[in-house]
Structure formats: structure tokens, C-alpha cells
């Protein structure tokens, strides 16, 4: 039932928001160049890797040694705007349609975190990751990793259609208020090291 709901809603949103997606795509192309889509390998259901899609928010500026500059330097004003209103997340509707993620579930993090989770924290991979989740509407990037994982595992143990609808409504409110986008001193949040 959840998969059917995800597919139908994501397809409807993709069609409904297509003019906005097109405008954002053209703006990213004009402001940052190609490619307009940033894709990164992330762990999905049971930790199986897939490529997550987002609109690019950073440029590719490098130092004299050819290394990419820090994220806070490469994040453009356009990128900040897209992140503020979560417009960079819109391509993930394609991930939902493909069945790689759900509308609601623990956010897909980095592949290198897989070996750092405790057995309890690893439970977050017992469901498909989501565009938004219980941790996102309860602090997002403004809470500790331990709190975030605790909220993710709580969702896994208590998931339901009603809870998903509640999270979607709360997410819309969060996006409109532009709350908890980043942790102080970071572009988004600090890296997880298994202890923080």
C-alpha cells in the first residue's frame, strides 16, 4: 500500500510541479552550468546502494592543487535559495517513482556511514529511505546525530499511513518556514563519525 501511495503521489507531484522543475533546471544551468543534476551513491533499503538525484547547489571551484574547495565556499547564493525552500530535492521524485526511496522514511545518508552505525542505529535501513522523515520534522540538521538516529528508529518501529501523512504535512510547514536547514557553522550539518 505504501509503495502504491508513493508511486501515485510522486507521479502526480512530478506532473504538477513540472513547470517549477523546468524553471529550476534552467536556472541551475544558467547559474552553475552542466550538469544540472547532482547524483551521489547512497544506501537504500537494507543498505543496498542507489544514486540519489538533486539539483546542483555548488560550483566546481578547486584550489591550486586541483582539489575541490570546501562546501561552504562552493555553495552559491542560488544554491542557498534552492536549499532554503528544498527545491534542490525535487528530482528525488524520480527516485520515488523508481522505487529506490519513499516519500517518507529515514533520510539516505552517505555510504561510508554504514560501518559506523550501532546495531540499533542500523535499523533505519529496514525501510526505504525517504525524501522527508520523522527526524526531518523534529529538528532536521539542527539536532545531534544520536537524536536523529533515535528518531529514525522510532519511525521504523511505528510507521503507518497516518504517521506518513502527518510527517508530510509537518514537512510542508517546515519548508515554508525554512526551519532547521543547517547546523550553525555548517552548510548542512557535521559529518557523522560514529561517536557524535
Image: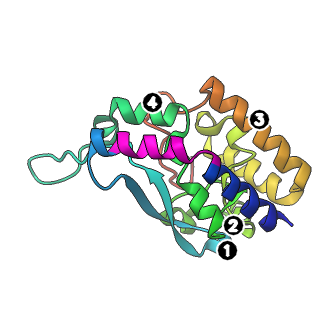
Residue at coordinates 61% horizontally, 46% vertically from top-left?
A: 145
Of marks 4 and 3, which one's residue comes earlier in the chain? 4
Query: In the structure shown, which secondary structural element does the residue marked by tag 1 occupy?
Result: helix
Estimate how packed mark 4 is, as few (under 14), some (14 to 19) or many (20 or more) residues with alpha carbons within 10 Å: few
Rounded to the nearest angstrom, the CA distance separating label 2 from label 4 is 30 Å
Q: Which residue is mark 3?
A: 170
Task: Identify the mark at residue 81; answer none if there is no mark.
Answer: 4
Task: Identify the mark at residue 46; answer none if there is no mark.
Answer: 1
* Residues tagged 1 and 2 counted as in contact (Cβ below 8 A): yes
Of marks 2 and 4, which one's residue comes earlier in the chain? 4
**Which residues fall within the magenta stretch?**
16-28
Task: Identify the mark at residue 10; answer none if there is no mark.
Answer: none
Q: Which residue is mark 2?
A: 125
Q: Is 56 colored magenta in this rendering?
A: no
Q: Where is residue 179? Give x, y as percent.
A: 62, 27
How many numbered marks are there? 4
Rounded to the nearest angstrom, the CA distance separating label 3 from label 1 is 27 Å
Q: Where is residue 15? Give x, y as percent.
A: 62, 52
Amino acid at each position: 500500500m505504501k509503495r502504491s501511495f508513493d508511486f501515485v503521489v510522486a507521479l502526480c507531484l512530478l506532473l504538477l510541479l513540472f513547470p517549477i522543475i523546468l524553471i529550476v533546471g534552467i536556472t541551475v544551468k544558467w547559474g552553475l552550468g552542466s550538469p544540472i543534476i547532482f547524483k551521489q551513491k547512497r544506501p537504500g533499503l537494507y543498505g543496498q546502494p542507489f544514486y540519489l538525484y538533486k539539483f546542483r547547489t555548488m560550483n566546481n571551484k578547486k584550489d591550486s592543487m586541483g582539489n575541490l574547495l570546501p562546501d561552504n565556499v562552493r555553495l552559491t547564493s542560488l544554491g542557498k535559495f534552492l536549499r532554503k525552500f528544498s527545491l534542490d530535492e525535487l528530482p528525488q521524485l524520480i527516485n520515488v517513482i523508481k522505487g529506490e526511496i519513499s516519500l517518507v522514511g529515514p533520510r539516505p545518508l552517505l555510504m561510508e556511514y554504514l560501518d559506523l552505525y550501532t546495531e540499533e542505529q542500523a535499523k533505519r535501513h529496514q525501510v526505504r529511505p525517504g525524501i522527508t522523515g520523522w527526524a526531518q520534522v523534529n529538528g532536521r540538521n539542527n539536532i545531534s546525530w544520536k537524536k536523529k538516529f533515535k528518531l529514525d528508529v522510532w519511525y521504523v518501529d511505528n510507521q503507518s499511513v497516518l504517521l506518513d501523512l502527518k510527517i508530510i504535512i509537518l514537512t510542508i510547514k517546515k519548508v515554508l518556514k525554512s526551519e532547521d536547514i543547517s547546523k550553525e557553522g555548517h552548510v548542512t550539518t557535521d559529518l557523522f563519525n560514529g561517536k557524535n
